[in-house]
Amino acid sequence: LLTTLSAVTWFPLAMLFYYKMTRSILLGDRLNQTTIFRNNLSPIWLGIIFTIMFLGGEPSILYMTILLFFCGSVYFTIEEWIEKKHLNFNYIMGITAAIFVFLGLSAVQLFPFMEFLKISSREKASFEMASIWNLPLHDAPAIIWPFFHDIYKLFTNYWARQSWLDNYYVGILPFIFFVLAVLFDKSKKACAILILGLTGFVIALGKDSYAHLFLYKFMPAFKAMRYSIRF
């Protein structure tokens, strides 16, 4: 849990620089600037933050963060092509540049880690092992109901229940604000937050959702990640 917190703590800052990068690309496109690095160092800073997240000790958090940002860049590229009939690859180039910065800065630790992963049991982990300690669907009320998970503990053993995260209560006010934003805010930011929240929830369900099984079978290195409750 501590390694996860050490990595996920940097996610808001990574999101900030990703947002600055996309805004700079959009502004540069309006000013007919073709390079993503003209007055825009956000990809470099984003790569540095990726490195810090990786060195925090939880590569799975960085893996999902990069995947999220890359999917966002693809979305922005497609959206601009549909709306303006202009294919702007700067979004994809920006996140790719950040990834290369990360690869260069973290190589001293990344390559030994990849070599170790190939000879570890994680490489051939079964679906039962990869999906252990997920968010049970019947335990979902614990997100907004304090100590609901403690009731669940009374009826199941340590390995059958979710035992990685003791409590995932987020508070009733954040949940209310989330619902209000979804219902009344029709901006793209609110839509992105909704998609992000639903995606994390579905993946956190683990073996109780087909999404986790799909990712386990077809997404590279996903089978090496355990405890889907973290998402």
Image: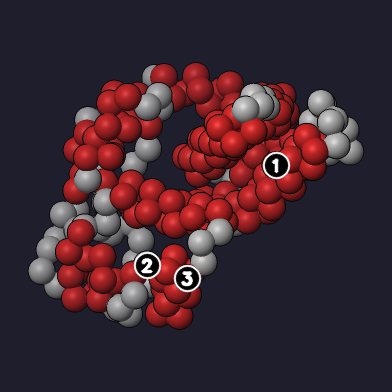
* Residue 13, horizontal then vertical, whole percent: 68, 53
Q: Which residue is mark 3?
A: 184
Task: Residue at 49%, 19% (x, y): give it.
Answer: 115
Q: Which residue is mark 1?
A: 22
Cβ–Cβ below 8 Å for labels 1 and 3? no
Cβ–Cβ below 8 Å for labels 2 and 3? no
Cβ–Cβ below 8 Å for labels 2 and 1? no
Q: Name the mark on residue 187.
A: none
Q: Earlier in the sequence, mark 1 or mark 3?
A: 1
Question: What is the secondary structure assignment of the residue under circle 2?
Answer: loop
> Does 145 appear above or below 106?
below
Q: Amino acid at mark 3?
A: Phe
Task: Residue at 30%, 78% (x, y): give it.
Answer: 145
Q: Which residue is mark 2?
A: 168
In front of the other: 25 or 208: 25
* Residue 40, horizontal then vertical, whole percent: 83, 38
In front of the other: 36 or 101: 36
Crowdedness of circle 3 by 10 Å Cα count: few (<14), some, many (20+)?
few
Question: Residue 101 appears in which quarter of the rendering?
Answer: top right
Q: Amino acid at mark 1?
A: Thr
Quadrant (top left, top right, bottom left, bottom right) of the N terminus:
bottom left
Question: Residue 30 appears in which quarter of the rendering?
Answer: top right
Q: Amino acid at mark 2?
A: Tyr
Question: In the orientation shown, which residue stands out farthest toward the right?
Answer: 39
* Residue 78, horizontal then vertical, whole percent: 55, 31
Q: Earlier in the sequence, mark 2 or mark 1?
A: 1
Question: In the orientation shown, which residue stands out farthest toward the left?
Answer: 155
Residue 127 visible: yes
